[in-house]
Amino acid sequence: MEKKLEQLLNSAKLEIEGVQTTKELEDIRLKFLKKNGPLAEILGSLSQLPVELRPTVGKIANQVKIEILELLEVKKSELEKVNESKKLNDWDPTRPGRKLPLGHRHPLTQVLDHIYEIFKNFGFHRSDGPEIESDYYNFLALNFSIDHPARDAHDTFYVSDDLLMRTHTSPIQIRVMQSAQPPFKIIAPGRVYRHEAIDATHHHVFHQVEGFLVDEGVHFGHLKGILDVFVKEFFGQDVETRFRPSFFPFTEPSAEVDISCIFCGGNGCKICKNTGWVEMMGCGMIHPVVLKNCKIDTEKWSGFAFGMGVERIAMFKYRIDDIRMFYQNDLRFLHQF
C-alpha cells in the first residue's frame, strides 16, 4: 500500500510538470483528488488493512494529498506568471488606445450654465448662499408677514424653530444687499426646497435662479427689456413675452412673465390650455421695505428682481412633460443631452 502511494505521488509529479495551461492543471487535480479518484480509493480501503498498519498508511496517504496540492499550487503560480509575461510581450505601445465613453453635463446643469452666460453678457455676477437659512433671511427680511401661508410647515421644511431649508434663492438677495453698497447686478442659482407632493410638474427639491439689479433710476421698463431679451436669447427670436399683474411680498409692483407657447408656436394646444401662453417666471420692482431692511436709501436707489424655476425652463426647452425624469438617473434619458 505504501509503494502504491509512492507511485501515485510520482505519477502526479510527472503529469503536473508537463502541464501547459490552467485547464490541464485543473484536469489533473480532478484526476488525482476527486472523490472516486485513486487517492480516495486508497483511503477507502484502509479498513481492509490490519489494525496496526492503518495509522501509518493513513498518515502517508494524507501527506501524499498535501504534497499533490502543494505541487498544484506552485504550478498554478508559474502558469499565471507565464500568462502575465505573454500579455506584456503581446502589448504594442504603438497601438492607439481604446476610446472610453465620456460623461457629459446633466441637462439641468446645461440649462443653468446657459442662463448664467446670457446674464453674464448683461453684466450680472454670480452669487451663492446657504441652503439652510434662517427665518429672517428666507421670510422676514423679504417682507413676508408673520402669518403668511408660506411659513407654514405644510409648505416649508423646518430644521428647527428658526432654521429651514430655503424655499427660494431670494435670501441671497438680502445677504448681498446687506454686505455691500449698490449698484448690484446679481444672478443667484441654487437648489431650493418645498414641502410638496411629487408629481409630473412638482418636486420637493428643485432649482431656481434669482436675479436682481439695484441702481439709480431703475424702472419697470428696464426689467421688461432685460427679460424679453433673455427669453429670445434662450428660446429663440420668435418667442414673445407678456407681463401679467401679480403679487409677491418682496416686489411692488409685481408681475408674472408668460412666453408664447413653444410647443404650438402660440396657436393653442393642451400644454398651454389653448391660450397660446405658458407661465415662466415671477418678477417685479424690489419692494421699498426690502431695500430699507438692507439699509439702502430708497430715495436714491431702486431695483428689480426676478425668479425662475430651472426645471420648468428645461422642460420647455427640451419638450419634457415629467419633472421626475431629471432625477431618476436613467442613462437612456440623460444620454440624449
Image: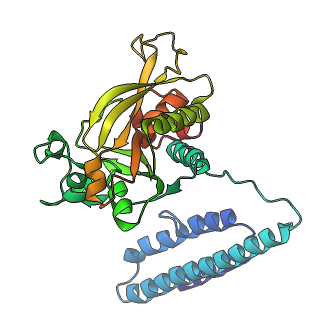
Location of residue 140 in the rendering, given as x and y in whole percent from the top left corner: 20, 53
Q: Residue at x 57, y 34 (%)?
A: 229
Q: Is residue 254 visible?
A: yes
| Screen quadrant of the C terminus | top right
Q: Residue at x 67, y 50 (%)?
A: 101
Q: Is residue 256 above or below residue 273?
A: below
* Rendering quarter of residue 332: top right
- Left or right: 1 in relation to 172: right
Instruction: Judge by depth and name the residue closer to the eye, 149 or 34.
Output: 149
Residue lying furthest right: 94
- Name the colouring of the figure: rainbow
Q: Is residue 308 above or below residue 164?
A: above
Which residue occupies the foreground of this view, 304 or 65?
A: 304
Look at 18% across and 54% down and name the residue there: 158
Residue 1 in sight here: no
Numbered disc total? 0
- Residue 10 percent across, percent down from the top left: 66, 81
